[in-house]
Amino acid sequence: MRCPLLLCLGLHILLQGHCLEFVIDGEREDESDIRAHQERQKRAMPTSEEEEDFVAVRGDNITVKSYKVESRITARFAHTTFKSSVVNSGSKPQSIGFNVHIPKRAFISNFTMNVNGITFVGSVKDKIVARNLYAQAKSRNKAAGIVRTNSQDMETFKTEVHVPPGSNIEFELHYQEMMQRKLGFYEHTLYLQPGRLVPKFQVDVYVYEPKGISSIQTKNTLGAHFADQIKVNSSTDKAHVVFEPSLQMQRKCETCTDSAIDGVFTVIYDVNRESNAGELQVSDGHFVHFFAPSKLSPLPKNIVFVIDVSGSMWGVKMKQTAEAMQAILDDLTMEDQFSIIDFNHNVRCWREDLVPASPIQTEDAKNYIQNIRPAGGTNINEALLRAVQMLVRTSNHDLLEQRSVSMIIFVSDGDPTVGEIKLGTIQKNLKRVMREEFSLFSLGIGYDVDYDFLERISMENRGAAQRIFSNHNAAEQLRTFYRQVSSPLLRQISIRFSEDSVTDVTQNCFNTFFYGGELVVAGKVLPSESTKLTSIISALAARVDMNLETEADMFDLDMQLAKHQHSFTGFAKQMWAYLTIKQLISERSIAPTAVKKRKITQRIMALAVEHQFVTPLTALLVESEDATERMLADSPLDPKKGCCSTLSGPTPVQFVYQPPPSWVQQSTEPPLREMKEPKVEQITLPETVNLVDNDPHFIIHLPGRATNVCFNIDSKPGDILSLVSDDGTGVSVNGQLIGSKKVLKNKLRTYFGVISVYYQPRGVGVTVSTDLITLTDNRKENSFTWGSTAEITQDGVRVSIVKDAHVNITINNNIQVMVLLHRVWKKHPVNVDFLGIYIPNNNQYSPLVHGLIGQFSREPEVHVYNVHEGLDPLKKEATMEVKGSRLLVTRGWQKDYRRDTKKGANVYCWFVHNSGKGFIDGHYTDYIVPGLNSFLHMNPDNTTQF
């Protein structure tokens, strides 16, 4: 990714004649490219001038009348505005500066300035066009300004205006950014450093998340005495964070004239995630799909740590690296494999091959790292090639788990000085040997490393790069980075849409998804008669293949946005442009030919101008209303590419665009992967089935006699009943009872709250509750919500979820179980959510099958006679002979809710009283089992044996 953008704008205005002179201190893009290699040698630590104290409004004898910040965050996309009104209170002309720290990932979208009634308005233009317009004004001596950029200012917007006494100046800067999820939360950061007391100081952050806000808080680094001044007001889907300290509260002490406001103001929040398939939003002809599953088991990792131990790492750098590695090694699990390569002018391997991360091995590795003494040169090429060879060798010997994630974590603080030193050659060498299933993550420590190079080799090899700032807590930065990649949950993720429904889709195929992060795909929606947009996600989890489906209404969100005063109505369109430009900038950095690079450049400039984003290829032209006076805010490409300090510590790992991997089926219009019918297969059961529903009512269908027999089970909450137990096929189906909220008419009603289907030969269990559907085996657990349609397969077990309706569980294509979800009003005084279970008669059990339902796979001889009027004229009574018993039965009906979960369909049956006594083998208490995966064993006398 590009270095964070700094715009540095200087303006000297002589109001009497409006006469300005403009100087540009910067290079054209092609000039900077030519000098890139030469400039690489000029990196240095920040100068004292660059480290000067930052203040938002700079000047002597000035009055800052107001300083206001407003952010509107809608569906993770933020539009932030900084405004300040300043008066030159001195007796002499002076320069007044307006400075804003902006987040590294943001794009400036506009800047306006009003000086004593003269308004300057900014607009983003192609850099060459903007420079030509500036040159026209300059030739008439009608514009002036200065642009400066250096390694430390790439996150700072600076403007300076020279004005006479009494002048009023108003500054206004806008920027936009997408919130990135890191370790389970979004962070919105504002840098508040006014540098003086301000009568009207106010910060407002408005958050609107259509699916709801699960948590929101603020991180206060401004001082303890400001804690009570930060107010958070939130509802289900909206939040307003306001910070409005009085003039007295701003003082460092009661009599001080200095401002105590100096720090970072951070809003941290996360959203509700009711669907494993993520959140699909459609607005203003664009869509955004957010995908961040959580309740999945981590995949095993194969990690080679490659650590620079050259002389430049001596001291604090090595100490903090070793400190971080202690914690990282402790975090490895027994399922992980790892090794360590340390290098200077030589390359050493702690172990020649990957080893399991057992306590003995990790302890030995920690001792090895502690004893490293940095010295010598830097042989990056050989170290990285040796790491790849280690992974390849382990893979060739089939020692990598099939669903594991293989990665190289590379830590260095400088350029190569030994062996191959040409960065382009190292990049080619690495690309040649890296396999598609391997990823490279690079960490650059300090200011001497070529961060551009680290980004390129990481992007090309399915990873990411991050700068570690040695003047901060480098050990914590290293640990934070590792935490972001320590829990891979999914591989080979593909987010697709139906044919002819969308276009211009951003990257939609990803190699790996890590816990706590989020994948985001955006695009344009094509005109259609449909009111719904459907997406389907396919991915590989731990021992599980899954397809997840979700849909969104085309018009609902726009209607909701119109109702919210502080929402950002254009968020979807701008987020699509933001993601597309970021993706194109990444593509451009690894473009194989000059022709391809030019084409990508043209696309970036066109999009940036259309959506008003200042990028390294565009400029902000600020001009007076009559366009006679112009200023140019221009950011030349930085050859150091990222050698800039961070103002808020480590930033989230940014997984940028990568070319589609080979497992993605190529289409004629990449990167969009189209599907003819993006639907998860719907599985239907036969018309007549055995079922248990409601309180709990059992309906047993006897196909040989074309009749149904019903009975209830009056057990207590917490009991687990055996429904199907088949030692022959290794399948058990059990249900756990829950109770209603309170006793009604002297009876506590019971329902099935949990259904378990267990397939013993593979050790796979499916547990269905009213909240989750969970697949477990001997080692892993993966959970899915009812909030999305999905299909999951694991070791002969297929689970098909229909959103908020039912789940079908199929074992080896010959045993089926449907579990039906019943939702009730959450505030109902008595009723609770519960489950129904539907099992076909044609399931292929073994002769050993039993259970309350399973026993009827062998249809008993049933004879019903002496049908007569009963006490209830609507319900006839009769005598039933079955299993040697003569039972009084009542004609009635129960409900089949498969087609109508509210009213159900009547199923007429003969009802057996007393919990099925005489119709079922033994007594119903014989079917109570100790666990959800337990099997039932009946003695010859029909008593239970476990």
Image: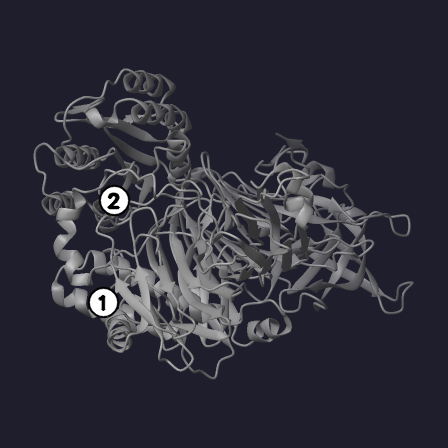
Q: Pick whichever, 303 or 403, lies toward us.
A: 303
Badge nearest the viewer, 2 or 1:
2
**Residue 8 pos. (x, y %):** 35, 58
Residue 521 sits in quarter: bottom left
> Which structural element holds mark 2?
helix
Height in image: 808 above or below 330?
Answer: below
For this view, does 809 lie left or right of residue 713? left
* Dot 1 amino acid type: Ile
**Residue 501 pos. (x, y %):** 40, 76
> Which structural element holds mark 1?
helix
Residue 756 sits in quarter: top right
Label 2 crowd bin: few (<14), some (14–19), many (20+), radius 10 Å: many
For this view, does 441 lie left or right of residue 693? left
* Dot 2 amino acid type: Tyr
Height in image: 670 above or below 755?
Answer: below
Q: Which residue is mark 1?
A: 600
Q: Which residue is mark 2?
A: 451
Mark 2 and mark 1: span between their CA atoms?
Answer: 22 Å
Q: Residue at x 61, y 51 (%)?
A: 214
Residue 802's tag is none
Label 1 crowd bin: few (<14), some (14–19), many (20+), radius 10 Å: many
**Residue 596 pos. (x, y %):** 16, 66
**Residue 451 pos. (x, y %):** 25, 44
Is the C-beta separation of discs 2 and 1 under 8 Å?
no
Q: Pick whichever, 87 or 76, lies toward us.
A: 87
Any part of residue 561 in sight: yes
Residue found farthest to the front: 91
Any part of residue 679 in sight: no
Q: Residue at x 68, y 58 (%)?
A: 822
